[in-house]
Amino acid sequence: MTPLTASILGGIACGIAMVVGGIFLLYKGAIELESASKDPALTVDLFKKQFSLSTRVPALGLFVIGLLFVGASMWVAMKTDVPRIPVVGEFIDMDEPINVTVHKEWSVASSQREVNDVLRPSFDVLWVKMVAPGYDPLDMSFSRDRMAGEIQLGKVTLKRAIPKIEPRPENIEPVNFPAPKFDPNAGGFAAH
Amino acid sequence: MKNLPRAIGLLLFAAAVLLTFSTSTIGQGVQVYGVVTNSAGRPVPGVAVSLIHPVNGRSRPSYTDQFGRYAIAGVPPHPAPYFVEIYWGQQLIYRQQVIVNGPMQWNATVR
């Protein structure tokens, strides 16, 4: 859990506690829904008193502030949510399944002695790589302007390079341990 | 409470051991790279090359480019042999044993 996620969840919990606590105090009679006096019972000053929220009805004040906590936390959560970018396209005249991956690489300043830079991830340009066995791979780049909310590949045809290779027993050496299942999209102990 | 300093000492010692172990394992790993060709000697593009090992499991696949080249980095050297596997889509078409004790080139010919 990231600190931001913890803060958001904490904000939501505080808001819910205030609303539920307000209901509980109202139920117990510790606070009242009717105005107690002409003086404000609860005042909240925000941004160096630029914004002030006063209420003579503390129960409603607790509800409003609690709901503000919940709403603000959910708004922050929605704003910081991982962007969803649909990838759409059509493959023409392909005999093999195509593995499509989207890549993004960020360069950081380095020298022959060290690397010391601050990474600022952005999605200004994304690379789409399409790979199919026996076909030449195809790379396409998409800038943020070109994406317009989604990666539209259009109609894609890869160039066939060689005919299909059928499995032959003499090419496959047996193993004396349970071989881990192959998953084209799974991670593993190494990188490339 | 008497055991508190001892417990803290043990905790610090364990943390130091863990840190040493983790920093020694980070940065280990070599690159296995090469070219995949067919029986006609032509490069095989778009196939997945992966390493499997009885202890380390399976590596992330590397897909060959238009020249049949692949590269798998961060392979931990191990006395037990690895196996290079090549997949045509989901179909295994090649598996051969390799010993990885340093950076190595493994060119595969799939007949």
Image: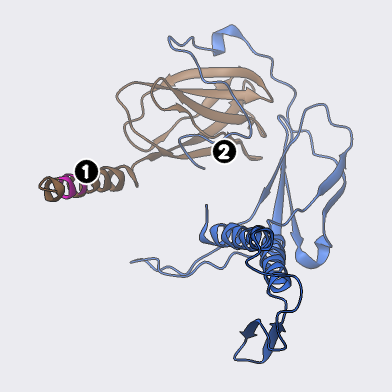
Chain colours: A blue, B brown
Q: Is residue A71 magenta?
A: no
The subunit carrying tag 2 is: B
Give the x, y percent position of residue A41.
66, 81
Residue linked to disc 2 = B69
- Name the one closer to the observer, A17 or B6: A17
Q: Amino acid at mark 1?
A: Ala
- Name the one closer to the observer, A162 or A132: A132
Instruction: Place residue A171 in its image quadrant.
Output: top right
Comes first in the chain, label 1 or label 2: 1
The subunit carrying tag 1 is: B
Q: Which residues are magenta?
A: B7-11
Give the x, y percent position of residue B87.
62, 24
Q: Residue at x 71, y 67 (%)?
A: A63
Q: CA distance from mark 1 to mark 2?
A: 44 Å
Foreground mark, 1 or 2?
A: 1
Q: Circle 1 sits in a helix, a strand or a loop, which is it? A: helix
Q: Is residue A1 above or below residue B92?
A: below
Q: Is residue A41 above or below residue B9?
A: below
**Disc number placed over residue B64 in the picture, else none:** none
Q: Residue at x 84, y 31 (%)?
A: A94
Considering the whole magenta stretch, tell me its main secondary structure: helix
**Disc number placed over residue B14 in the picture, else none:** 1
Q: Amino acid at mark 2?
A: Arg
- Name the one closer to the observer, A84 or A136: A84
- Relative horizontal placement of residue B29, taking residue A142 as reference (left or right): left
Q: Circle 2 sits in a helix, a strand or a loop, which is it? A: strand
